[in-house]
């Protein structure tokens, strides 16, 4: 009894790699190995790349908007029409300024996800799941190993990026101290360049961390989708069908096939028997086939039923032990007689036709 319980325990332990079907089902549910840090690194890098390329243009546009606001809009009377016009023009100008950043952010997000998991669209994670509101399960998630790993990863990112940012500021400390002797334009250019450099450095630092995070996410994902031996057996049953149900279906199909076969026996020209073990019902119809063909065959009990039906329907039975046994093993129901048996079958049919004419 104890051995049986132990075997059941080990059979239920998730020690097996996930099957392709399990992986496909998990993917349909949106459960994939993905590092959010890769998305953040891509987003940060491309956004700062756009700032680096279009920074001057964006600065010029912002400056023009400020000038217009304080040289034209400020003198307008506050009316419904003027407020509407200021709002529309200001919105259009701001949209033009931030459009490159918004556009590249969308592209970067899509590219980061496609790089990791390929094309995947599913609404499964958006479905309402009351299990997520379970406080006990929530507490387990908070104090789980995964939560500790995420905490350590967050602290590592803060320290890593903080050190890099401080190091860049330290490199430019002398220039920063001299900003009071420079013009506003030069100061803004310095801060802009420094910010872009810090952004690129932070993006590369995040990407470096993301490589290890992605490896961990893959490991954690593989561990979570592992299956037990019982799970694999159940999956095979679902795919191939329960063996008990399959056997019942096959039995039902066999019975239906036998009924169809028995309904063809009365149309046969002759039944060749062993005489007790084998029975082969043969028919010759030039309109259906160029050679005689088997309409029914059986052994033992089924052979007895074929002979009984033939007797009740006036189909002649001929005993030929060798021919009956040879035809049973060589021909399937509905198949024509092979050439090597033509002569033997022809003799039987000729004998039957002669007897029928005499009758």
Image (tube, helix red, strand yellow):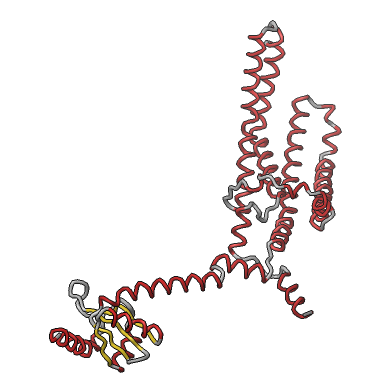
Location of residue 62 with respect to 4 vertically, above or below? above
Going by the image, does 204 lie left or right of 158? left
Going by the image, does 102 lie left or right of 278? right
Residue 339 visible, this angle = yes
Residue at the image point whose x is 56% and y is 69% from the top? 242
Residue at the image point whose x is 69% and y is 65% from the top? 226
Residue at the image point whose x is 60% and y is 57% from the top? 25
* Residue that protrudes farthest toward the top in the picture: 77
Residue 39 percent across, percent down from the top left? 68, 47
Quarter location, residue 257: bottom left
Going by the image, does 337 lie left or right of 120? left
The quadrant of the rendering that contains the N terminus is bottom right
Give the camera-side residue of 111 and 247.
247
Residue at the image point whose x is 67% and y is 35% from the top? 51
Location of residue 356 with respect to 244 vertically, above or below? below
* Residue that protrudes farthest toward the right in the picture: 177
Residue 21 percent across, percent down from the top left? 58, 62
Residue 151 visible, this angle = no
Location of residue 83 with respect to 145 vertically, above or below? above
Going by the image, does 247 lie left or right of 344? right
The quadrant of the rendering that contains the C terminus is bottom left
Residue 303 percent across, percent down from the top left? 36, 85
Location of residue 2 with respect to 75 vertically, above or below? below
Residue 71 percent across, percent down from the top left? 70, 11
């Amino acid at each position: 009894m104890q051995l049986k319980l132990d075997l059941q325990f080990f059979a239920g332990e998730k020690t097996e790699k996930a099957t392709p079907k399990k992986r496909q089902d998990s993917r349909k549910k949106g459960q994939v190995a993905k590092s959010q840090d890769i998305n953040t690194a891509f987003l940060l890098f491309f956004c700062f790349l756009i700032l680096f390329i279009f920074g001057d243009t964006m600065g010029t546009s912002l400056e023009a908007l400020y000038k217009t606001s304080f040289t034209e809009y400020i003198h307008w009377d506050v009316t419904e029409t003027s407020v509407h016009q200021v709002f529309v023009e200001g919105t259009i100008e701001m949209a033009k300024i931030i459009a490159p950043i918004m556009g590249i952010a969308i592209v970067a997000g899509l590219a980061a996800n496609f790089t990791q998991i390929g094309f995947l669209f599913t609404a499964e994670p958006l479905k309402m799941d009351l299990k997520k509101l379970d406080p006990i399960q929530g507490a387990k998630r908070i104090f789980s190993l995964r939560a500790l790993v995420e905490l350590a990863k967050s602290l590592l990112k803060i320290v890593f990026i903080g050190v890099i940012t401080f190091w860049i500021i330290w490199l430019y400390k002398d220039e920063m101290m001299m900003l009071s002797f420079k013009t506003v334009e030069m100061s803004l250019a310095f801060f802009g360049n420094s910010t872009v450099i810090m952004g690129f450095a932070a993006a590369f630092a995040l990407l470096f961390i993301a490589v290890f995070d992605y490896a961990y996410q893959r490991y954690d994902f593989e561990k979570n989708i592992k299956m037990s031996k019982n799970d694999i057996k159940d999956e095979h049953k679902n795919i191939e069908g329960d063996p008990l149900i399959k056997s019942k279906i096959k039995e039902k199909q066999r019975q239906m096939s036998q009924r169809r076969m028995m309904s063809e026996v009365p149309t046969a020209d002759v039944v060749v028997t062993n005489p007790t073990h084998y029975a082969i019902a043969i028919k010759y119809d030039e309109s259906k086939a160029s050679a005689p063909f088997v309409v029914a065959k059986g052994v033992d009990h089924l052979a007895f039923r074929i002979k009984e039906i033939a007797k009740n329907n006036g189909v002649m039975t001929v005993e030929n032990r060798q021919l009956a046994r040879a035809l049973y093993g060589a021909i399937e129901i509905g198949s024509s007689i092979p050439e090597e048996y033509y002569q033997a079958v022809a003799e039987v049919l000729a004998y039957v036709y002669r007897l029928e004419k005499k009758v």
